[in-house]
Amino acid sequence: MRHNHGYRKLGRTSSHRAALLKNLTISIVNFGKIETTLQKAKELKSYVEKLITRARIGDSEAHRFVFAALQDKTATNKLVTEIAPKYADRNGGYTRIIKTRVRKGDAAEMAFIELV
């Protein structure tokens, strides 16, 4: 049983999973909306929302925290200076998941994840 298990493994090692979430986060920051599998989208939602909550502060410590998670200067700058201030009066719920289709090759459920 997996009672109160904290995260989805996504069939990857911990380092591969961390890299996957980092790359998906960079994509969603740059493009605003991406299509991925439903399970990846659900795991990514938690990851992105924690970063946005931290980036809302907007000081140099927020920049450091976001950069440590993303390792991408342009995405970090965009997240802290453009995206996070839009959510200053919102307490969570920065992303939306919309189920789209079933992928033909492996019948995986696909979904869009986008910034609200």
Image (cartoon, grey):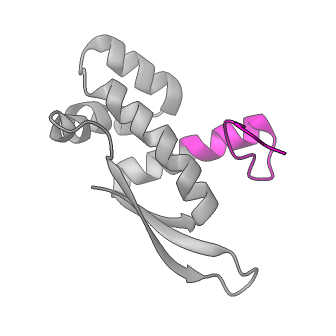
Horizontal side of residue 78 vs 99, given as left or right = left
Q: Indicate whether 63 appears above or below 49.
A: above
**Residue at image location 79% in from the left, 43% down from the top:** 2
Q: Indicate whether 95 appears above or below 51.
A: below
Q: Residue furthest top?
A: 61
* Residue 71 in view here: no
**Residue at image location 68% in from the left, 75% down from the top:** 108
Horizontal side of residue 114 vs 84, given as left or right = right
Q: Give the quadrant of the N terminus.
A: top right
Q: Give the quadrant of the C terminus.
A: bottom left
Q: Indicate whether 58 appears above or below 1.
A: above
Q: Is residue 90 magenta-colored?
A: no
**Residue at image location 70% in from the left, 42% down from the top:** 17
* Residue 4 in view here: yes
Is 91 or 23 nearer to us in this picture?
91
What segment carries the magenta color?
1-22
Q: Residue furthest right?
A: 1
**Residue at image location 35% in from the left, 37% down from the top:** 74
Horizontal side of residue 75 vs 11, given as left or right = left
Q: For residue 50, which quarter of the picture?
A: top left
Is 51 or 46 nearer to us in this picture?
46
Residue 52 location (% of width, % of height): 34, 35
Residue 98 location (% of width, % of height): 43, 70
